[in-house]
Image: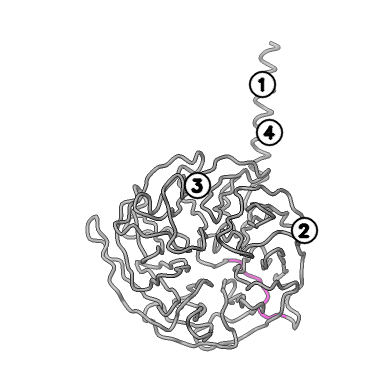
Amino acid sequence: MYKSWVCCLSLLAAAVATAAEQSEFRPHKYDWPQWQGPERTSISHETGLLKSWPKDGPPLAWKAKDLGGGFSTPAVAAGRVFGMSLRGKNEVVWALAEADGKELWSTPIAPKNPAVGANAGPRCTPTVDGDRVYALGVSGDLVCLDAATGKKRWHKNLARDFHGHMMSHWGYSESPLVDGDKLICTPGGKDATLIALNKKTGATLWKSRVPQGDGASYASAIAADLDGQRQYIQFLGRGMVGVAAKDGTFLWRYDHPANFVANCTTPVYHDGEAFGTSAYNKGGGLVKLVREGNRVEPKEVYFSDKLRNHHGGVVLVNGYVYGAHGGNRENRFYALVCLEFGTGKVMWQSHDAGKGSPAYADGCLYYRNEQGPVLLVEATPNGYVERGRFEPPDRSKAPAWAHPAIANGKLYLRDQGVLLCYDVKER
């Protein structure tokens, strides 16, 4: 009888612990749990947000300082904010409380890579999946951490374990993709251009060998469904490619938008069409993906030099692409551009907005100019309509390259060692 009671109490305690863990990591409706938000589209589906801002911007809810250098955009999930930084001699992943910005933990994952220079800390946005967090360091250190404590669950290195390499010298910048039980990332090279790992153990499920053996670029992969076949689309060193989600089989490639310096922009997929864009005197192109048995034929719809996106990313809203035009070799001709997705027609461009990174929520673009100003712009093809702008405090000397994140009525802005949280909920 005693042993039975002990067994029952043990089972009850385990059940209570499991329930508490599930409750602790229960996602909120409008979390931003990974790079470019819940669907990797830079879109939040939250409503009831401010349609205009006062002169000094929306109210500042809290500010976290001394985070360490880097360009990592934060992820927000289950009451926590996750990011990456360079602190002293180490790259770290950290977690803050969503309510007040108080640091909960930080975990070193790799030593500083001296080749990437000052202010060039990690760029990856951690990917949150249940009670686990996945992050990638500049030198290719891929980690799975416990979301509650930061404890390391497994660790791989893309260069050492998969013979990966980059297209150029700035180091890995990808944000890993979780799709079902798989973790997708891009070592680059001929042996394992893309890989799928078991997200719980880190075991290799498949290696995708793209025939040209492209080096990894600075973009992040997305998942797409085409005529019943799931695939992963990634912008590599020489072009945009698709591989089968089931086993990594190479399906197609489209090279026109690629430059040979830094391809950074996450691909856009909608209704059987894929869009890619880069700067360095290239541009943006759209392909129609036509499935032919086990093959996919990418048929170019158009190519335009009117949207040469450097690394601010683009967002597709109601049939129109919004993003910054201009990069290091475009003579500083910077503008926010609205492009018709299906035709490439330029609807408008604004030099007042300049070069930056957009996110979308509730009818508006949240646009982070890389020199500092943050703008609220109507997402309409009918013309540039600005609904507010302000200058965030504590600007660093480095460009503001971290993208904006929108979660649960808050706007998050990272600037090297500082993270600002603004209340953008309409009252």
The amino acid pointed to by label 1 is Cys
The amino acid pointed to by label 2 is Asp
Query: Seen in the image, is 267 located left or right of residue 89?
Result: left
Q: Can see residue 412? A: no
Q: CA distance from mark 4 to mark 2?
A: 28 Å
> Which label was assigned to residue 415?
none
Q: Quadrant of residue 76?
A: bottom right
Up-down relation of residue 115 to residue 142 (above or below)? below
Tell me which numbered mark, 1 or 2, is placed earlier along the sequence: 1
Q: Locate the N terminus and report the quarter of the image it occupies.
A: top right
Of all residues shown, which one is farthest toward the left?
A: 293
Q: CA distance from mark 4 to mark 3?
A: 36 Å
Check if mark 1's residue and mark 2's residue have beta carbons within 8 Å. no
- Residue that mark 3 sits on: 157
Q: CA distance from mark 4 to mark 1?
A: 12 Å
| Eye-nearest disc, 3 or 1 | 3
Q: Position of residue 380 (x, y in %)?
A: 52, 83
- Residue that mark 1 sits on: 8
Q: Position of residue 348 (x, y in %)?
A: 49, 88
Up-down relation of residue 239 to residue 78 (above or below)? below
Check if mark 2's residue and mark 3's residue have beta carbons within 8 Å. no
The amino acid pointed to by label 4 is Val
Q: Which residues are magenta?
A: 45-53
Determine if the magenta segment contains residue 50: yes
- Residue that mark 2 sits on: 100
Tell me which numbered mark, 3 or 1, is placed earlier along the sequence: 1
Tell me which numbered mark, 4 or 1, is placed earlier along the sequence: 1
> Which label was assigned to residue 16?
4
The amino acid pointed to by label 3 is Asn
Which residue is at the front of the view, 258 or 381? 258
